[in-house]
Amino acid sequence: MSAPAPGRLLDRLPGGYQLYAAWLGALRRPGIEWRVSPLNQWRLSHPAPEGLGGRPRDLRPADAEAGRRILAGGFVFGGETLALGPRGDPWDRPSPSRRFAGALHGFGWVRDLLAHGEAGAWEALRLTLGWRRLFGRWNGFSWSPPVLERRVFNLACGLAAISGPASDAEADQIAADLARQARFLLELPGDPARAAERAAVAGVAGAALAGAAGEGLLDRALGELPRRLEAAIADGGHATRSPQAALELLFDLMTLDDVLSQLGLATPDEMLRALDRLAGAVRFFTLDDGRLGAFQGGEPVAGPYVAAARAEDAAAPHAPVPPACNGYHRLEAHALQVMVDAASPALGPWSLAACGQPLAIEVLAAGKRLFVGSGWSPQAAGTPALRLVDAASTASVAEADCGAPLSGFAARVLGPRLRDPYAIADVRRQDTPAGAWLDASHDAWARSLGLRHERRLYLDRAADELRGEDALVPRRRAGGAEGRRFVAFVVRFHLHPQVSALMARDRKSVLLKVEGQEAGWWLRSDALEVMLQPSTHHEDGLTRHGQQIVLRGQARLDGGAKLRWKLSAAHEPAIAAHVDEQVA
């Protein structure tokens, strides 16, 4: 019996998510008991691999410094440290956090160790054998889907190097473990948002193993991959609408494509199309600083990491970047670059990392991040509140959310899906040599307040100015006292941590200075009040603190409101006359 596909119906039914979670949990329980049973574990162990097959290459760049720290006995993931001393055992003690444990059990450190040649291979072998002694049969956390998926991939890519210093018996054990884990991964139910990644990872594992074990895994993975890729790739990018998710799937598919070539096997046509589309998406999402736009549960990602994927993209040097992809729009002038999230968030199981941040923007000035969002991702240490509208550079009304993640029992069964999401409507764009217009609106506050948010952006290419208008437009007739009621609204501009802000004497304008740049930028508006407040931003899993500009206004329910703002270059001689203090 298959589960029904939940849609917006669950948002409208009282207790809809709780009921669906209870029903789905009851369906899954017998399957979990079977998967972890000794009989199924024995079944998954056959047939045994007959040595090694291809040598999959993880094209993600290794962090040699992280490898050096591990050789010295220190594991550091996302700013958290587990200090063990040389040849310490990380498996017999608590990890600093669940997020840290996920990175440790995911074996991403293998490629960092293997950057150190024979010494790294010996240490990777020791740690792998230590893991299998405690967790090799099964463990609820270390065999959970996201951790298992990454461990299978990383172990497959490091298998040949790890097996080098191993005895024949140890090498056979590790290969058998890889085959069993890959089979277990392929048989996990549900979660369409990771189905393509799982099939690609199982294919990489199958290609790394010789004999019937490897051939069976590879055949099954390649048989499932086309339909899973069809579901996972939407409008050129990943169906979750996360730029980082598109990049990570591209890495996995490139590794699989490379090892298939080693084995003299043809890459399926559907996979070749997916590689082309994802490479195009990564080109689109890579901004002038070499990092990705950080939206919908994706971090900016370090420039060398993105560059490693683009180095394999033969079309990159001459392929044009389209103005829109996967619901995002790029507006570009000489010095300013703007990315706008102009589509609805993913729904249902695809929304586990989605953010309720309609019409959010990121702006780069002369290749440096100026306006950003929280950069939240599941790997970041930040609170789930950073998935909400106040954590993005966009408008919000009366502290009302535009979708929030599930919590409690429903989240434990279904994951932290985004519930009550908004819908983007009426996206219009016009490009001319002089500039680019983008108009879009959303309905997040239509039911509760009867207001529609309309955002209009104009990038003047000649003047290098970005002009914006955020309007709240009544969608229903509100008469009497209700219509005369005012609600507060704000337009936020979160600043990158390397940007400083100084308030002008008129308390309406803000001078922005980017670290390392001599020129500044003015943000001017007709807001009722302009304030500077603290902000949080995530990069490379680390939390960084900065500022945000908050433009305040009032909207009457029967009349709405407009707030206009403009970002333009500052002229140095005029700065001293207009700025008299720095606001912390």
Image (tube, rainbow, N blue to C red):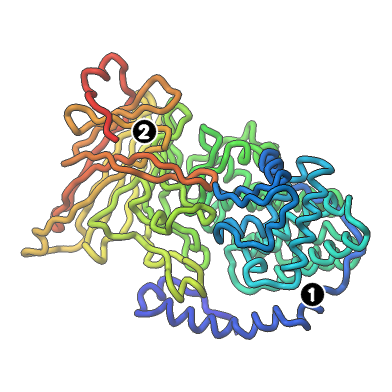
**Residue 566 position within the rendered picture, expressed as x and y whole percent measured from the top left:** 28, 33
Q: Quadrant of residue 334 in the image?
A: top left
* Residue corresponding to mark 1: 44
| Residue 150 visible to the viewer | no
Instruction: Identify the mark nearer the N-term, 2 or 1.
Output: 1
Is residue 65 visible to the viewer in this orientation of the structure?
yes
- Residue 353 as seen in the image, left or right of residue 123: left
Give the camera-side residue of 570 and 12.
570
Lateral position of residue 266 relative to residue 301, left or right = right
Image: 108 above or below 224: above
Left or right? Give the position of 121 relative to 414. Answer: right
Quadrant, the N terminus: bottom right
Q: What residue appears at the point 8 percent right and 58 percent down from the top-left corner?
A: 484
Residue for badge 2: 459
Q: Nearer the viewer, mark 2 or mark 1?
A: 1
Local crowd at mark 1 within 10 Å, few (<14), some, or many (≥20)? many
Query: Residue 224 in the image: x percent, y percent?
Result: 71, 66
What SS does tag 2 mark?
strand
Q: Look at 34% across and 49% down and name the residue there.
A: 440
User: Identity of the amino acid at label 2?
Assistant: Leu
The image position of residue 470, as x and y in percent, is: 26, 45
Q: Which residue is pictured at 69% across the width and 83% down the height? A: 34
Q: Secondary structure at mark 1?
A: helix
Q: Amino acid at mark 1?
A: Leu
Label ID, residue 381: none
- Rounded to the nearest angstrom, the CA distance separating label 2 from label 1 is 58 Å
